Amino acid sequence: MHLPRKSAVTTSPYHVLGLEDLPFPNNPVVDPYNDDPRRNGSIYAQSTAQEAIDKFEHLLIRPDDFMNRVGLAYLWSKGDSQSGRGVGKTALLRYFRQRINADWGETEFKGQFSAVVVYVAFPNQVDRRYMEQLALSALVDICKSGVLKDSRAALRLAEMSEQEAASVLMGEDGSAKPENLLDDSILQAHGIAPAKLDGSVHERLKREGIHPTIAQFLSQGRFEEYLRALRKDGNLEPLYVPRDTKILDFSRGLLLNDIVNYLRAANFAGGYLFIDDIENLVDQMARKDRIEFAKEFALCTVRPGYANTTHNFFSSVLTTHQQASVSLSQAWGEAGLAAIARLDPGSPNSVELPFPSKDQGREIIIAHLDYFRVNKQELGSIKPFTEDGIEALLENRQTVHPRDLLARAANVMRYAVGKGVAFVDAECVKSAGESPGSLAMPDFTEGIEGAL
């Protein structure tokens, strides 16, 4: 019998290249929930998407005119269903999500108000109950993001006297400790009964129009428990399980009424629904399903009927590409959404993300290298690449495909470490591409460069 051994701490083989680890993702698909910075979008070369960032800010951030931001916008990529993937749409959404959710908009909006980004994604294609699954995906993200916990702290604080709040918030070192608001033992030490405090929050939430049962779970910090109780298996994912759909019967109302009213009670002025990979939602729809979804989407996001639309709370941002939009454009028109935000890249409500230029591809590589550098004095350099090595990696193209580029870069790094080289030159890049098991990525940019 052999017992499993605890992993020993070893020096990374990438130290020979001046790096703490492999700087490029093994799987170059952005996953905002992944802990790996190479996968979750933490490594972001902002300069490569600055034009798109500027337009996104103009349409949707508007710190001095927040209530007049657009309610519906689109983030496009060049290319079709294949080449349009991996261009950086998810990474851009993650960039704004991190910017805003880091402190719920305090920095972004200069302390004027709070805001939240809710991220919706469909890793697999959806074949029924489209709007309900979209709403459930949003609820799952809300549970993961921490916004419910911090909102509960704000609501507890609002129900305390100034003297109680000052004593609870003061840490032993004299600094403010907002996390104390959720520590029942600290509250009790200051003579505050947590159950009574939650009862006051419960009454406040009911006055805000939240269903009494849901208000109770929210006030007690048990909303995720409530959601899980709506499923026989007690899980929240996958979003759709045949014959276990009770949770979908409630998802729209929970998101667009109860959660909106809860966040408003906690001083959130609004937020964003980032709806990623919309093609996974619409690709299998029949024409009548597309029309039904478009009408339901309009009801939930722009037409009267929910607290969300009454208070213009969530702005929706859909990521797509031209091929996916064709199947939705007619339905968008029949639902009246085209008059609000035309579904095409030339719409005033559209932000288009082009393929990065060769120079911008270089910046993507440097951003990943910098994140893992051992010697921080080398930040901004191309080391361990030589000049001809990075030229070979970028190839003689006008533009690059980010996912293709990162996959090839990871392959080159692994090859270089295996060969024990200290620098990655053109010969190393070429040999890595010819070695057994190397990645033969499709040339997504061929035939597109002339249009850019």
Image (cartoon, rainbow, N blue to C red):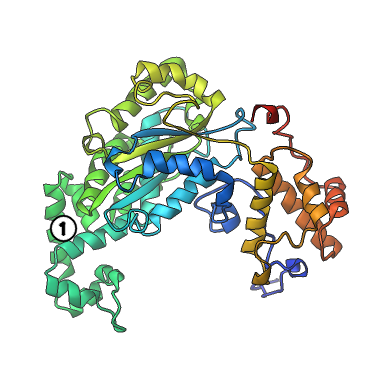
Q: Look at the image and tell me whether residue 298 can be seen.
A: yes
Q: Where is residue 439? Give x, y as percent.
A: 77, 44
Instruction: Please identify the quadrant where the N terminus is shown.
Output: bottom right
- Farthest residue, direction bottom: 173
Front residue of this view, candidates 190 and 73: 73
Q: Where is residue 78? Give x, y as percent.
A: 59, 31
Q: Look at the image and tell me whether residue 273 can be seen.
A: no
Q: Is residue 23 left or right of residue 426?
A: left
User: Residue at point 65% right, 46% down?
Assistant: 360
Instruction: Please identify the quadrant where the C terminus is shown.
Output: top right
- Residue topped by disc 1: 201
Q: Where is residue 298? Give x, y as percent.
A: 32, 26
Front residue of this view, candidates 209 and 5: 209
Position above or below: 2 against 141: below
Front residue of this view, candidates 99 and 347: 347
User: Residue at point 36% right, 35% down?
Assistant: 245
Q: What element carries label 1?
A: helix
* Amino acid at circle 1: Val
Q: In this view, does 364 lie to the left or right of 71?
A: right
Q: Where is residue 202? Give x, y as percent.
A: 15, 55
Res 136 → quadrant: top left
User: Residue at point 73% right, 68% down?
Assistant: 18
Q: Is residue 67 left or right of residue 36?
A: left
